[in-house]
Image (spheres, rainbow, N blue to C red):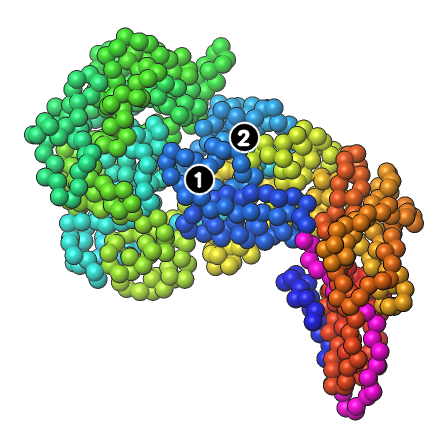
């Protein structure tokens, strides 16, 4: 008869076996209390479908319900150009970032002008200006220990005084190939491994040794200046080459397009491009299918002509320093780039006047200051894929400028709307290992090996290499479970397996497969929309009055409460077998030297969650007692016990009987912390009483408690051979026993109704 309690409450059942028959006895009413059914806030959590992100959302909603916050989970389909983060109709969001970590500089994410600033951070928020100043300073410090400490202090500020997110997980990344696939190194990634890979016979389900099959979601935009999804980035990386090659140890190497450099001074470097590198043909693949004629660079009708009137056939357009300079200027120019914030450090960039394969970069970490400042992370910013200047630049004399003031000839505000720029978004070409052949939305993207690639391996600089297969097929399978099934059927040659620990463990002992592991440069977190009410809004600017918490705003207190209420360890055990790394900071754990592990941590703590919620929302610490319910001939009294004097009377009780409409009456103040109201005794068996209290909090705001309810339950006479059940919400006395069991009902009710 009692309600099943939540997993955090102990259910105590005492069963008493009778050895003699006793006569039936008279029973007084029992009260069965319900869960809270009226939340103090309603929030919207948005995430994308696929993988476990929707599961994260559902668990978070469950945890927050326990502190009186109702969460609606919305699973969105990510379809270009619509992006739900650009709208202001969400409160919480499950977000994953990846691909970074080479530097602690994450201003794209954590500053007002950052292109990835989904939190809506800004210097107007308390501590926001301090945060941005610390981030700007961090990129100029060359003393590694001093720089490390500054980033430690900044991370503590972000997670203690601002709290834009709750970090969730940064997993080890696992991938798997069939055992016949040799030469793959997960640290270097698929693209860099292709010239070193080979097949040793066929695997189950494999039909060709000249294809490499894998799966991903739909790509959306191939021009890297506008790309913001990993699926698009991967397709582009198969066709492109980075200007500067980086090793898995996060060090620059001379095995790519740049094969040497020299330091002129601390703020001036000269870079040398590899000779005899050419752009792949500028094929127009629009409308191509599997039945189209083969790509033919001799057929000029298959080639797109650039803004300067030139095309590439694979041998007539050399990759030079002009292309590298053009690429850097594009990234820094608002006319064509959405991520200029990462390129203001380039104070000047130009082709060497005497060598078309050399270019110069001048560095200034803080352009606003008169003297140049060092920018210690510039190496990691030079890994952008090179763009074809002959195709994307114009001959117009119009001048625009980068964010740092460098003059750009040919780039103008409407250039992105030209036919060439629009075509490059879907028919992109680079100077990399593969060329785009055709794509079918929601089905497949097919790439063909380029005979024009310069053939130098990223691992060791070995020359004369060729990618090991002629064709790469990237099938569109956005659901990771379906992708795994296709791999096990032999229809894919490589797949990610991080989300499937049980399958991965089986494959590790299966000789048919080879499993690879690496520390993932990814981070999944729950983002707060700082401009939304309750978790942000005006409460971002109202500081708390609770002793010891005067340095925190009310909105930060709410966000802290939410963070403490979420059991990330339990989610990790249930969803990931406990194998994911629980993250605690705004940086990637992958950025190990700068990642601050001794930061404030929001480990699951429901007591702290309730404390921060009370102090931030203006809720007193309170409980309810229902008095005289054990006597059917006495009036029932609802008692409201709060921590200290609320300061302003009256405290009003609202109650209703069987959904017949709420009555309200001021409660009687019995003491500095106890208010009560007699609601009478004219109740029949099964009567449901719902009630809540309205009061004025310490911020002089009208507030109310969540609605609670109880049911009057008169239990009829019963026979012997019965039992007693005691749990946190009901007391049912069914019979008497020979053995005397003493239970203090008054003490028990007081405990169970808090």
Residue 23, magenta (yes or no): yes
Judging depth in this view, the residue of 689 and 113 nearest the camera is 689
Name the quadrant containing residue 688.
Answer: bottom right
- The mark closer to the camera, 2 or 1, is 2
- Tell me the SS state at disc 2: loop
- Tell me the SS state at disc 1: strand
Residue 370, magenta (yes or no): no
Q: Earlier in the sequence, mark 2 or mark 1?
A: 1
Placement of 190 over or under 656, stated as above or below: above
Q: Residue at x 16, y 19 (%)?
A: 310
Q: Residue at x 63, y 35 (%)?
A: 533
Q: Which residues are magenta?
A: 18-37
* Residue furthest out toward the right: 670
Q: Is residue 72 left or right of residue 180?
A: right
Judging depth in this view, the residue of 72 and 92 nearest the camera is 72
Q: Residue at x 28, y 64 (%)?
A: 511
Placement of 453 over or under 684, stated as above or below: above
Q: Which residue is mark 2?
A: 120
Q: Is residue 512 left or right of residue 100?
A: left
Q: Is residue 300 left or right of residue 88?
A: left
Q: Which mark is residue 97?
A: 1
* Residue furthest out toward the bottom: 20
* Residue 569 in picture, x, y percent from top left: 55, 54
Judging depth in this view, the residue of 146 and 244 nearest the camera is 244
């Amino acid at each position: 008869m009692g309600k099943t309690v939540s997993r955090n409450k102990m259910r105590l059942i005492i069963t008493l076996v009778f050895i003699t028959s006793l006569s039936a006895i008279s029973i007084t009413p029992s009260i069965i209390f319900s869960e809270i059914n009226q939340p103090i806030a309603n929030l919207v959590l948005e995430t994308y479908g696929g993988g476990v992100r929707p599961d994260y959302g559902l668990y978070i909603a469950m945890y927050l319900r326990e502190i009186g916050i109702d969460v609606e989970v919305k699973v969105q389909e990510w379809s270009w150009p619509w992006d739900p983060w650009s709208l202001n109709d969400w409160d919480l969001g499950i977000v994953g970032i990846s691909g970074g970590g080479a530097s602690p500089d994450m201003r794209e994410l954590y500053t007002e002008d950052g292109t990835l600033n989904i939190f809506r951070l800004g210097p107007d928020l308390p501590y926001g200006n301090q945060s941005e100043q610390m981030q700007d300073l961090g990129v100029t410090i060359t003393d590694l220990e001093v720089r490390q400490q500054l980033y430690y202090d900044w991370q503590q500020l972000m997670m203690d005084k601002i709290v834009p997110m709750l970090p969730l997980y940064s997993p080890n990344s696992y991938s798997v190939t069939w055992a016949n696939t040799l030469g793959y190194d997960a640290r270097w990634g698929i693209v860099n491994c292709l010239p070193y890979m080979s097949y040793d016979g066929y695997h189950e389900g494999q039909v060709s040794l000249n294809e490499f099959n894998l799966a991903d979601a739909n790509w959306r935009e191939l021009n890297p200046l506008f790309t913001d999804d990993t699926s698009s980035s991967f397709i582009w990386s198969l066709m492109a080459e980075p200007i500067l090659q980086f090793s898995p140890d996060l060090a620059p190497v001379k095995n790519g397009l740049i094969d040497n450099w020299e330091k002129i001074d601390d703020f001036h470097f000269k870079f040398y491009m590899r000779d005899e590198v050419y752009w792949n043909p500028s094929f127009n693949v629009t409308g191509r299918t599997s039945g189209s004629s083969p790509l033919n660079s001799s057929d000029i009708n298959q080639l797109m002509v650039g803004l300067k009137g030139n095309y590439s056939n694979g041998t007539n357009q050399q990759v030079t320093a002009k292309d590298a300079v053009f690429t850097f200027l594009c990234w820094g120019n608002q006319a064509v780039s959405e991520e200029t914030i990462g390129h203001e450090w380039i104070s000047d960039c130009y082709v060497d006047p005497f060598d078309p394969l050399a270019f110069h970069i001048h560095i200034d970490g803080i352009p606003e200051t008169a003297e140049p400042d060092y920018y210690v992370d510039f190496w990691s910013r030079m890994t952008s894929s090179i763009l074809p200047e002959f195709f994307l630049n114009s001959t117009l004399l119009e001048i625009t400028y980068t964010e740092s003031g460098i003059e750009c000839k040919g780039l103008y505000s409407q250039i992105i709307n030209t036919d060439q720029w629009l075509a490059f978004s879907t028919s992109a070409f680079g100077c990399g290992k593969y060329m785009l052949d055709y794509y079918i939305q929601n089905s497949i993207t097919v790439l063909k090996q380029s005979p024009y690639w310069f053939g130098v391996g990223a691992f060791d600089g070995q020359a004369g290499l060729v990618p090991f297969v002629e064709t790469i097929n990237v099938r569109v399978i956005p659901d990771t479970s379906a992708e795994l099934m296709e791999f096990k059927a032999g229809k894919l040659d490589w797949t990610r397996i991080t989300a499937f620990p049980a399958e991965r463990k089986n494959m590790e002992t299966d000789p048919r497969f080879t499993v690879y592991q690496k520390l993932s440069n990814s981070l999944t977190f729950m983002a707060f929309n700082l401009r939304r009410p309750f978790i942000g809004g005006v409460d971002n600017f109202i500081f708390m009055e609770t002793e010891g918490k005067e340095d925190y705003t009310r909105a930060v207190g709410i966000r802290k409460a939410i963070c403490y209420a979420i059991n990330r360890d339990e989610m990790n055990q249930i969803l990931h077998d406990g194998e994911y790394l629980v993250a605690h900071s705004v940086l990637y754990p992958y950025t190990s030297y700068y990642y601050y592990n001794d930061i404030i941590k929001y480990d699951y703590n429901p007591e702290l969650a309730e404390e921060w919620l009370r102090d931030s929302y203006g809720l007193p610490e309170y409980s309810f007692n229902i008095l005289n319910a054990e006597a059917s001939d006495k009036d029932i009294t609802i008692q409201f016990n709060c921590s200290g004097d609320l300061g302003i009377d009256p405290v009003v009780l609202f109650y209703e009987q069987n959904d017949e409409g709420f009555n309200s009456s001021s409660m009687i103040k019995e003491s500095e912390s106890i208010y009560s109201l007699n609601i009478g005794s004219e109740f029949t068996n099964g009567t449901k009483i719902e009630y809540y209290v309205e009061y004025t909090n310490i911020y002089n705001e009208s507030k109310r408690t969540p609605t609670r309810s109880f049911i009057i339950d008169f239990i009829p006479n019963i026979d012997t051979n019965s039992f007693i059940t005691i749990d946190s919400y009901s007391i049912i006395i069914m019979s008497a026993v020979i053995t005397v069991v003493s239970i203090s009902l008054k003490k028990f009710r007081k405990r169970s109704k808090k």
